[in-house]
Image: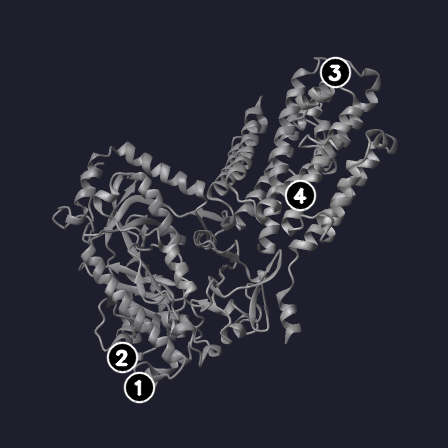
Amino acid sequence: MLSRVANHIYWLGRYLERAENYARFIDVNFNLMQDLPVDLKEQWQPLVAATGDWELFTSRYQEFEKNQVLFFLAFDLDNPNSMFSAISRARENARIIRENLSKETWEKTNQLYMMMQEGCEKKVWKKPDPRPFFEKIKNQILLIYGIADSSVARVEGWYFRQLGQFLERADKTSRILDVKYHILLPSGQDIGSPLDFLHWMALLKSVTGFNTYRRAYGNIDPSNVVEFLVLNKYFPRSIYYCLKEAEYCLHHISGNLDGGFKNPAEKAIGELRSHLEFAEVSEIIDFGLHEYLDNLQIKLNKLSELIDSTYFRLRDNFISQNQDQ
Amino acid sequence: MKIEGYNAGEHYDEMFTPQGEIRPHYEEFFQSLKKIPNRKMNHLQFSANQTQRAMGMTFNVYHDNQGLEKILHLDIVPRIIPNQEWKHLEAGLKQRTYALNLFLQDIYNDRKILKDKIIPEELILGSKDYLKPCIGLTPPKGIWCHITGTDLIKNKDGEYYILEDNLRCPSGVSYMLESREIIKRAYPNLFNKKGVMPVSDYPAKLLRMLQNLCNKAKPVVGVLTPGIYNSAYYEHSYLALQMGVELVNGVDLIVQDKRVFMQTTQGLQQIDVLYRRIDDVFLDPLAFRPDSLLGVPGLFEAYKAGNIALANAPGTGVADDKAVYAYVPKIIKYYLDEDPILNNVPTYLCREEKDRKYVLEHIGELVVKETNAAGGYGMLIGPKASKEEHNKFRELIKNNPTNYIAQPTLSLSTVPTLTEEGLGARHVDLRPYILYGSEIEVIPGALTRVALREGSLVVNSSQGGGSKDTWVLYN
């Protein structure tokens, strides 16, 4: 597969995952607002904090008002991480490599983009209840995943898209956990209160993990939530799980199915994955969750660079030609 | 659908005779059309538009700052060509393609036609499209123009006239293919009843033709595109997808030891044939324009060494110049000793003093074209233009006569087209596609471009033109 094509497929995977995360995240938190006691003001601030675009937001807006926050997170093309930005880029990547996608995958991705355009024209962020819109976006992305799952051959292209998807997911889970955990923890004395419960529930629902968590751990307990989201072996959005899957993809891309590593990217991900595989949650808490997640993010970034230099970087054909002569 | 009130005026209408009778090859379609209520017809048009949007069948417009991607409007009333008429076109196009190919081989090698003074030498050797690096070259199998998209019109006399030979990188074939799919959905019961010849095997034929250019058992083929901002990017990716080959950009390719390689995730992989959709002079900054960022340094050397086949061959542009066009009947006669089957439009070359004098005097009756412009730009339609425009073009011609040709105003035939007021007569042209592989083949279908504005003769997509599906009948 062409390196440039692999690069675009990888980013298609990343942007779709990013958009889907945002859609769900906004939906869940909008829900949360409905359940807050009347005397508590709507809290849109944490939503912005969790996405990591705090600085951009505060540089442009005075206060955290619902319509503004929704516009900023979902529709603002000047916010490079907004849902619309992610979907535009997903579509742009898909358009560039359309010859490598099935007709359906392209058409549904194109449709997704047009849904966003329509939402923009209809000013969805001003609606009293914009949830159906986000639900629609989320479902459209899940539809694209479904089509891919049942129609794409398990060859390189498939693994590059999956690789992008799982690395993006690992990144998003770690971000949400980092921010939410620190907003929630200071209210320690409220643990077990209905309000506290609502917030933890919202966090778990933001990663579609509420029911799975319930079944596995029962009551809400901060360290259990950390274990669930970082180390759980079976939950498809835990950081460990995402890394395990990403590693699997890398090995299928290089054809190295005997373990060990064949290139620097495989070495880095193998180390990171095994580190998580044998970690205990108490170690993470003792180390400091924030510091731990911070470290993890740095390693994830490093890993992205290694993937880039191993597979995507093109040689300048002009220089190579000149050396040749 | 209401037909009353339809009026083609003095033009040749392809569905109705001047007496208002249905031409026989439209009879069956007309009977179905009559039964479709206006509302249903509008709905069919609406779903066709939606389908195009969903498929992302877009083109990018130059000279336009309102958004990049546009849809080429597809009118749902097809243009129908009876088989006998098609046979004539087919024979004429084969003849013309064959002769132009011999012409290209000759002017880059023996130059017999120039030595015999059939064509003024400086018209060819002085043309900016005559590529010096191609002198002395014979492309694989001696084929220069592998893919041709010739523009024709049907005049008032009911005869076809060749308007332009597009021998470089003719576009639009994806619209021919996708439009057919959309129109098949609109009239599901009509196709086999009517006996419409299929076009869907074009990508397979194209691939076979490209593979034919290399002697390897399994040659690696790719489509070379300037990239996503090119107006025909949709077509490039569509053809790559349909042929199952790689779509490559210049940056994906690297030349080593006069061989061309793709940069893949598993290292370098050699590529043997390129269907290139990049203009000649941008192909290789070392051989042509040094500022080209689209091309591949060293590609031309590899081509000369016979290690990569290019379709179309570099250098074909010189033969579809609007001034050379005037000589094509002589070219056919010279190489084949045959009379041309298809008509040329009489053409005045402003470079010739006698012709120029005539053009300056009769500018109000003529169509003036720049020899090197495409897309309907740099063009004057005399009868429709103002006095100021006439004078402006007179000056342009005087200052740079070699740059202009003029032709009598032709009447483009009309075909019924769905408009807001019901069916209206709109002018069309015709672009069939010709493949030159082990033999010359004309694809039984075409891109019909239609000027959507009433009375307009400009069919270019960049200037308010749309398209129609073109049905070539078995009988």
The residue that appears at 39% across and 55% down in the rendered structure is B203
Q: Which chain does the residue under circle 3 lie in?
A: A
Query: Toward the viewer: A279 or B76?
Result: A279
Q: CA distance from mark 2 to mark 4?
A: 66 Å
**Residue under numbered circle 4:** A248
Element marked by disc 3: helix
* Alpha carbon distance from label 1 to label 3: 96 Å
Q: Are marks 2 and 4 on the same chain?
A: no
Callouts 1 and 3 in the same chain: no
Depth order, front residue of B380/B170: B170
Which one is in front in this view, the residue at disc 4 or the one at disc 3? Answer: 4
Q: Earlier in the sequence, mark 1 or mark 2?
A: 1
At 60% from the left and 51% from the top, the residue drawn is: A6
Kind of residue sitting beneath label 3: Leu
Q: Quadrant of residue B35?
A: top left
Q: Which mark is residue B334?
A: 2
Q: Chain of mark 1?
A: B
